[in-house]
Amino acid sequence: MLLAVTLLAAAVPQPIAARLPEPASQPLRLEPQRIDRTLRSFVADRRLAGASVLIWQGGRERYFRAAGMADIGAGRPFARDTLVQIFSMTKPVTGVALMQLWEQGKFRLDDPLALHLPEFAGVQVYAGDDTAGRPILRQPSRPILVRDILRHTAGFTYHEAAGSLGRILLAEDPLSLDHTLTEFGQRQGRVPLLHDPGSQWEYSAAVDVQALLVERLSGRPYADYVRQAIFRPLGMTQTDWTPPAASRARLARIYEERDGALVPMADAEWLAPNFAGKPLTMGGSGLVSTVDDYLRFARMLLGRGSLDGVRILQPATVDLMTTDQLDPAITRRSFLPGKGAIGFGFNFAVRKAPPQSAEENRGTVGEFFWDGWPSMLFWVDPANNMVVIFAAQKLPFDGTLHRDIRAAVYGPGYLGPVGRR
């Protein structure tokens, strides 16, 4: 079973204004009433069952509101302590864990991946099918490097693939929740690459490979490492892959939009993998958290690796992770251009230029962010000393919500100031 939960759709935003205003840069002015109106409209227009927004700016909380319902059937409103499944917002956590081990000298970024994970030593590149429908495989132009799994350039994929590659992917089913991380690595290592390492950006299971690497290098189960090295020092008491069963009463239900209506997902679908009791602890998905807990993680990043006197990473490491790492020659970037004038660092999208059109999401040069399948979003804006957490549980992934909440935070015509990184 391929986990569609790990995919993010590239929703095409609609115009915010007829044209971009002048001047090209201006100070940020948070307007709580504007954010309130936007958040309420999401619920009133049935774009969401419920959601919340939390903003930390200038060293203090500047805004929090929740609107709508966490569970319509149960009559339970979205609240400050509502638990949400953050899906791919798990990925930055995994990246931080791996880069802690880099700081300890456990690996080098340009090490061949197979040096640490021999399962990937024999990986080949898929070059199509022969006349009998069998895969044509060739040697990659170079080995997969550790930096490739950090920036999604290894050649892995999440997506259904054409031809015999698709059949191999389905047969191996590396991300089945019935596998351990070790079994995942063995199966992923038998799936041919979609392209040569370093040649394209392709959103993929690379972050689950990162989790396996954390486990292998630390000598500890991946989830245990993250709990002890990140969650416990930061005081993130509400964040985990397997939260206590009693916390299910605070968990927001995921809703799907079908023919203009919001339909609750069945328990068997919306509770996996977090409450499924399966062995796979994913590096690319699976965490449950609250807006306050995830804010602590994001504030650590805003603090360049430190929060409340606790250092998780060195400042230079955070700078490295949040700087564009994609070579200009990497021109094929899947859905990434749909998110704006951005590049990609290590597990973060990074804004490289002010919005280029009226349709593009508002934001600041130097910001870094990522999102999660049920329309979750967070971003860190160093130029404005700000973190924003947007919690939602709506499928399919809706990029228009992100466009509109950013416009509400910044103002629909915001273009700057240009951040200094």
Image (cartoon, rainbow, N blue to C red):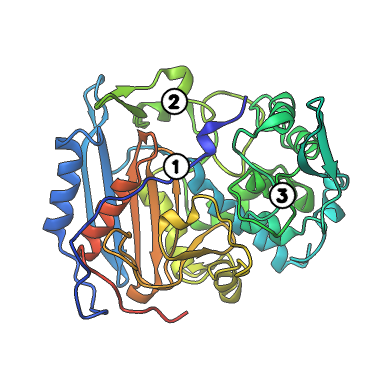
Would you identify the image quadrant in which residue 398 lies? top left
Residues under labels 2 and 1: Cα distance?
18 Å
Residue found at x 48% / y 48%: 89
Q: On the rendered structure, is 195 left or right of 412?
A: right
Residue found at x 39% / y 39%: 397
Decide which of tag 2 and tag 1 comes sooner along the chain: 1
Depicted 49 relative to depicted 342: above or below: above
Quadrant into which the N terminus falls: top right
How dense is the environment of label 2, judged by Cα within 10 Å: few (below 14), some, or many (20 and up)?
some
How dense is the environment of label 1, judged by Cα within 10 Å: few (below 14), some, or many (20 and up)?
some
Element class at badge 1: loop
Q: Which residue is mark 3?
A: 195
Q: Which residue is mark 1?
A: 9
The label nearer to you, 1 versus 3, is 3
Q: Which residue is mark 2?
A: 270
Q: Is residue 78 visible?
A: no
Q: Which mark is residue 391?
A: none
Residue found at x 82% / y 57%: 141
Residues under labels 2 and 3: Cα distance?
33 Å
The label nearer to you, 2 versus 1, is 1
CB within 8 Å, label 2 to label 3: no
Amino acid marked by disc 3: His
Q: Position of residue 6 (x, y in %)?
A: 53, 38
Q: Position of residue 173 (x, y in %)?
A: 69, 28
